[in-house]
Amino acid sequence: MKTIIFLFLFIGMFMIVHGIYEEKYDKLRKKTQVKYKFIPRTYYDDFLMNNDIKNTTSVMFDQKPDTRSAGFPVR
């Protein structure tokens, strides 16, 4: 009985190690290229310089929480 347990343990360890090395081998084999995308400067500036955060996030904090969510509302 102990022999069967050790046999399954060895086979399981072998399969785990084989899967890890196979995954690493596939990552090394793929030649991935970096794709650069152009973002116009106006969108970039709007994203970085958006100081209107209070108006954007006020909806999340001012409304009552949904009672259908995970139990009672936290207040």
Image (cartoon, rainbow, N blue to C red):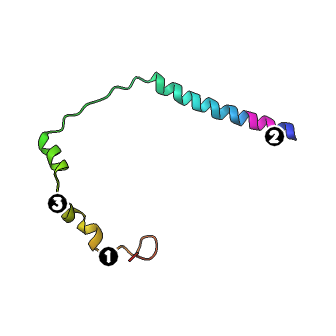
Q: Residues within 10 Å of mark 1 (few under 14, many from 20)?
A: few
Q: Residue at x 83, y 38 (%)?
A: 4
State the image coordinates of residue 50 (x, y, percent, origin top left): 17, 54
Q: Tell me which segment is drawn in magenta.
A: 6-10
Residue 34 against residue 62 in the figure, above or below? above
**Residue that badge 2 annotates:** 5
Q: In which quarter of the image is residue 3?
A: top right
Question: Which is nearer the N-term, disc 2 or disc 3?
Answer: 2
Amino acid type of the residue that numbered disc 3 sits on in the rendered structure: Asp
The Cα–Cα distance between marks 3 and 1, rounded to whole angstroms, is: 22 Å
Q: Residue at x 19, y 34 (%)?
A: 38
Q: Quadrant of residue 18?
A: top right
Question: Which is nearer the N-term, disc 1 or disc 2?
Answer: 2
Q: Is label 2 or label 3 in front?
A: 3
State the image coordinates of residue 72 (x, y, percent, origin top left): 44, 77
**Residue that badge 3 annotates:** 52
Left or right side of 56 for 65: right
> Main structural element of the magenta stretch: helix, strand or loop?
helix
* Viewer-side residue, 57 vs 26: 57
